Image (cartoon, rainbow, N blue to C red):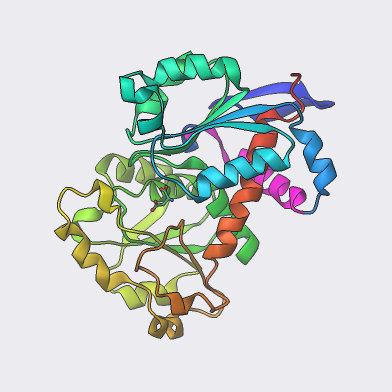
């Protein structure tokens, strides 16, 4: 686990995270600390917030498209008083186009910035380049692998909406094969007690075998449900996802997923306290008429991303001498 214990900001021995490339880089205790911090930061004055990362420079390198992740990270750095250096569309607009490796980019950008936030199209590239980075690296989405900061904000949203994460029934729908947010969320839910997961997915888009085995070994209770409406009825949390068309080998794989779209008529099936989450962007898997229902939590979830990313950056960089 990439956690170092150090004395910072007058808090002797406080734990803080360093690299956050996989959900395995944090544990339950870290998740709880970050959720508490996110909650605290949403009430802190703009002026106090600005002192937390004063003088810090954070590079944001996006080799794949992004809206929420990139902008919420950049907003988080700015609100905390730091500055961002950016390469948006880095696959085209950076030296990646000339064939430069990510490892070389980390070596160089690590001389300009105090931390690197990076999204990459290759699943293992960030982890491969990590050992040479002179500064902390935060994975903002790695191919069809992991998206650990999304999992943090997802779990934070569940706690904010329902008051707890333990003992909930979570129904995850859609592209479980390529959906990196699903992989990170399930790994993070495994840190909690008594969570029951129901999976609803097209036959060819189930969890990768390795992940399924890994999760089974953690004791997380997982089962498949083929009756979509029954799955909706029994869930406390419904986590809907987009089919990752850009990663599909055969677009026909996506067609089966249409049976799992959440439509206004499904709202009557949901428990009164249930919540619908979605990492966004939404395409057609949640009908827009669902948005006005109080149980649709996905836009609040996107807002929570700002506070969770502020908490994470403060955890990694706050109180560090610069
Ligand atoms: N925004 C999320 C991601 O980057 C979810 C998605 O694209 O479907 O993985």
Residue 166 seen from this side: no
| Front position in the image: 191 or 133 | 133
Q: Position of residue 155 (x, y in %)?
A: 55, 53
| Front position in the image: 239 or 313 | 313
Asked if residue 300 lies left or right of residue 43, the reply is left
| Front position in the image: 208 or 128 | 128
Q: Position of residue 182 (x, y in %)?
A: 40, 51
Question: Which corner quadrant of the image does residue 233 belong to?
Answer: bottom left
Asked if residue 296 lies left or right of residue 13, the reply is left
Residue drawn at the location 63% of the way across and 47% of the way down = 308
Question: Which corner quadrant of the image does residue 62 belong to?
Answer: top left
Asked if residue 201 lies left or right of residue 137, the reply is left
Residue drawn at the location 38% of the way across and 74% of the way down = 262
Looking at the rendering, the stretch of residues picked out in magenta corresponds to 24-42
- Dominant secondary-structure state across the stretch colored magenta: helix
Residue 279 vertical placement versus 95 (above, below): below
Residue drawn at the location 17% of the way across and 56% of the way down = 251
Tally of marks: 0
* The C terminus, quarter of image: top right
Residue 245 seen from this side: yes
Residue 136 vertical placement versus 223 (above, below): above
Whether the magenta-drawn stretch holds residue 189 is answered as no
Residue 78 vertical placement versus 169 (above, below): above
Which residue is at the far front?
93
Question: Which corner quadrant of the image does residue 292 belong to?
Answer: bottom right
Q: Position of residue 213 (x, y in %)?
A: 31, 42
Q: Position of residue 258 (x, y in %)?
A: 26, 70
Whether the magenta-drawn stretch holds residue 41 is answered as yes
């Amino acid at each position: 686990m990439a956690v170092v214990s150090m004395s910072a900001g007058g808090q002797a021995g406080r734990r803080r995270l360093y690299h956050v490339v996989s959900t395995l880089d944090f544990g339950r205790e870290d998740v709880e600390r970050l959720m508490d911090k996110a909650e605290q930061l949403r009430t802190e004055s703009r002026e106090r917030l600005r002192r937390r990362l004063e003088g810090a420079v954070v590079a944001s390198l996006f080799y794949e498209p992004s809206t929420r992740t990139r902008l919420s990270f950049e907003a988080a750095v700015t609100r905390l008083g730091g500055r961002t250096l950016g390469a948006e569309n880095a696959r085209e607009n950076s030296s990646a186009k000339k064939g430069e490796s990510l490892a070389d980019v980390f070596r160089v950008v690590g001389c300009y910035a105090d931390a690197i936030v990076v999204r990459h199209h290759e699943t293992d590239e960030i982890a491969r380049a990590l050992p040479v980075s002179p500064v902390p690296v935060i994975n903002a989405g790695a191919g069809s692998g992991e998206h650990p900061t999304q999992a943090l904000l997802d779990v934070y949203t569940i706690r904010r909406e329902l008051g707890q994460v333990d003992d909930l029934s979570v129904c995850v729908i859609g592209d479980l094969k390529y959906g990196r947010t699903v992989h990170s969320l399930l790994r993070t839910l495994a840190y909690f007690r008594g969570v029951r997961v129901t999976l609803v997915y097209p036959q060819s888009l189930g969890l990768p075998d390795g992940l399924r085995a890994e999760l089974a070994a953690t004791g997380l209770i997982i089962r498949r449900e083929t009756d979509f409406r029954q799955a909706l009825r029994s869930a406390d949390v419904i986590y809907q996802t987009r089919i990752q068309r850009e990663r599909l080998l055969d677009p026909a794989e996506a067609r089966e997923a249409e049976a799992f779209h959440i439509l206004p008529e499904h709202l009557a099936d949901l428990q009164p306290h249930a919540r619908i989450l979605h990492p966004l962007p939404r395409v057609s898997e949640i009908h827009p008429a669902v948005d006005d229902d109080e149980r649709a939590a996905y836009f609040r979830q996107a807002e929570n991303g700002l506070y969770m990313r502020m908490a994470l950056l403060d955890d990694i960089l706050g109180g560090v001498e610069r």
